[in-house]
Image (cartoon, helix red, strand yellow):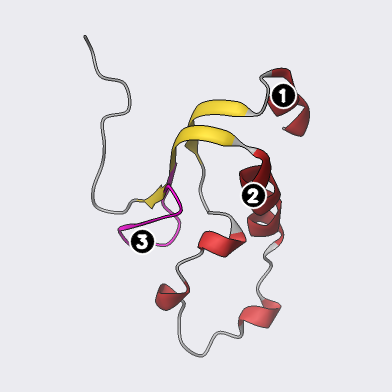
């Protein structure tokens, strides 16, 4: 992935990911009683490295089953957005 991003100068118009960078996780929706210290966060940490170096126009994710927008990342659940409008 990083090699491909290097080829485009670390700029992407639209990103679709399942989860989000670790600093953007909506911790307010975590299930009570689940020890987050034992949850694998390797993907979220990797996405954070990408996020820290990337320029992008739009980023969409959906893993958390909530509607939220933080740090220019939109988490969608029951809403949807038109990504490519016809002109």
Q: Which mark is residue 4?
A: 1
Secondary structure type for disc 1: helix
Between the C-alphas of marks 3 and 2, the distance is 19 Å
Q: Is residue 65 left or right of residue 56?
A: left
Between discs 1 and 2, the one toward the N terminus = 1
* Real-space CA distance between mark 3 and mark 1, rounded to the nearest whole angstrom: 29 Å
- Residue 35: x and y in percent read 61, 85
- Residue 14, given in percent of the width and then of the height, sits at 46, 30
Residue 85 point in image, percent of width and height: 25, 19
Q: Residue at x 72, y 59 (%)?
A: 42
Instruction: Identify the residue under disc 2.
Output: 47
Left or right: where does residue 9 sit relative to residue 18?
Answer: right
Q: Earlier in the sequence, mark 3 or mark 2?
A: 2
Few, some or many C-alpha atoms within 10 Å of disc 2 (few <14, some 14-19, many ≥20)?
some
Q: Position of residue 50 (x, y in %)?
A: 67, 43
2 above or below 39?
above
Residue drawn at the location 57% of the way across and 63% of the way down:
23
Q: Which residue is mark 3?
A: 65
Which image quadrant is residue 22 in? bottom right
Residue nearer the viewer, 66 or 57: 57
Mark 3 touches mark 1? (CB < 8 Å):
no
Give the answer, above or below, for where 33 lies relative to 5: below
Residue at the top extreme, as displayed: 87
Residue range highlighted in magenta? 60-72
The quarter holding residue 57 reads: top left
């Amino acid at each position: 992935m990083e090699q491909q991003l290097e080829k485009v100068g670390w700029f992407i118009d639209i990103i679709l990911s399942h989860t989000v960078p670790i600093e953007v996780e909506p911790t307010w929706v975590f299930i009570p009683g689940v020890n987050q210290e034992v949850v694998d966060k390797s993907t979220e940490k990797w996405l954070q490295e990408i996020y820290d170096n990337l320029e992008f126009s739009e980023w969409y994710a959906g893993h958390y089953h909530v509607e939220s927008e933080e740090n220019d990342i939109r988490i969608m659940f029951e809403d949807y957005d038109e990504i490519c409008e016809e002109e």
